[in-house]
Amino acid sequence: MKRSKVWFPVALLGLMLTACSGGEPPASNAGGTVATIEGSVYYRERMLLPPGVEVEVQLQDVSRADAMATVLATVNQVPEGAPPYPFEITYDPAGIDPRRRYALRATISRGEQLLFTSTEYTDPFQGNPVEVLVQRVAEPVQRGAPALVGRRWRLETLAGEPAPAGAGAQPPDLQFDEADMRASGFSGCNRYSGGYRREGAAEQGNPLAFTAMAGTLMACPEGGELERRYLRMLGEVTAFTIEADRLSLLAGNEVVATYRAD
């Protein structure tokens, strides 16, 4: 079914957002004005949302790969009908630094249950209207389900962006051994291994936490920075979800990495 687009007039309060292809944010000013990003949130599944859901869109500073995103502005609303769901998010342009990197993140939740989340980078300053695609979050799976163990998971996205290849043009990967509760794989330069836990509760999805990882000590001309980011990400993981052959790792309610099974 072809998805129709809904276009909205550009509404700016005191400042025009740039529509240049480079995605440059508007210049800061000290006049106390605000700016508005307009767009829509959509998903590709042929389904209607259940009653009681809420759409949230955040403007985030994602400049630091080694830290959680900083939320600059948030808008929440109750969606009506079928997607796309229009939104307007207002922010202070004086807080925008053109040297930093920003993104829009959207989620659809029902109470404490996360139903959909964006997993790809969306430039908030690409020009209005901005479209944000959200992916459906899989239903929780039970401990020991074969969907998690016994498969090699190859990294597809890291921090919402396509994952670069590591040494030998190979992406990082991840495997789980439930018998010993060990996780292992290739981290971009070296092989790594360590423990993992499935106990406790998670804000979203199924609880999962990795212990400190040990690895080989090879020096690689390529993949070193990827390896540091990847292992740091594993240390932040609090939960996971699985849908078909896709694994998502979460820190809180934020998807920090996605994988595909071989």
Image: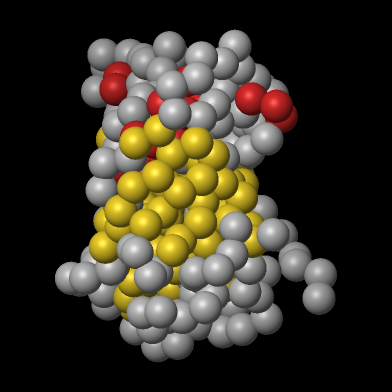
Marker count (numbered): 0
Q: Nearer the viewer, residue 9 or 120?
A: 120
Q: Position of residue 108 (x, y in %)?
A: 42, 68
Residue 212, image quadrant = top left
Name the residue: 41% across, 18% down: 100
- The colour scheme of the drawn protein is secondary structure
Quadrant the N terminus occupies = bottom right
Q: Is residue 29 visible?
A: yes
The answer to whether 203 is drawn above or below residue 23 in the figure is below
Of residues 60 and 169, the one nearer the viewer is 169
Image vertical order of residue 52 relative to residue 106, above or below = below
Q: Position of residue 9 (x, y in %)?
A: 60, 47
Q: Which residue lies at the image location 51% right of the left edge and 30% below the top edge? A: 190
Q: Nearer the viewer, residue 87 or 193?
A: 193
Q: Position of residue 234 (x, y in %)?
A: 36, 44
Horizontal relation, residue 143 to residue 116: left or right: left
Q: Residue furthest right?
A: 2
Residue 44, given in percent of the width and then of the height, sits at: 67, 69
In the figure, 75 relative to 233: above or below? below
Q: Quadrant of the C terminus?
A: bottom right
Residue 14 in sight: no
Q: Residue at (27%, 17%) from the top-left corner?
A: 31
Which residue is nearer to you in this view: 114 or 239? 239
Residue at 64% in and 25% down: 167
Q: Residue furthest left?
A: 200
Q: Quadrant of residue 92?
A: top left
Q: Residue furthest bottom?
A: 51
Name the quadrant containing residue 139: bottom left
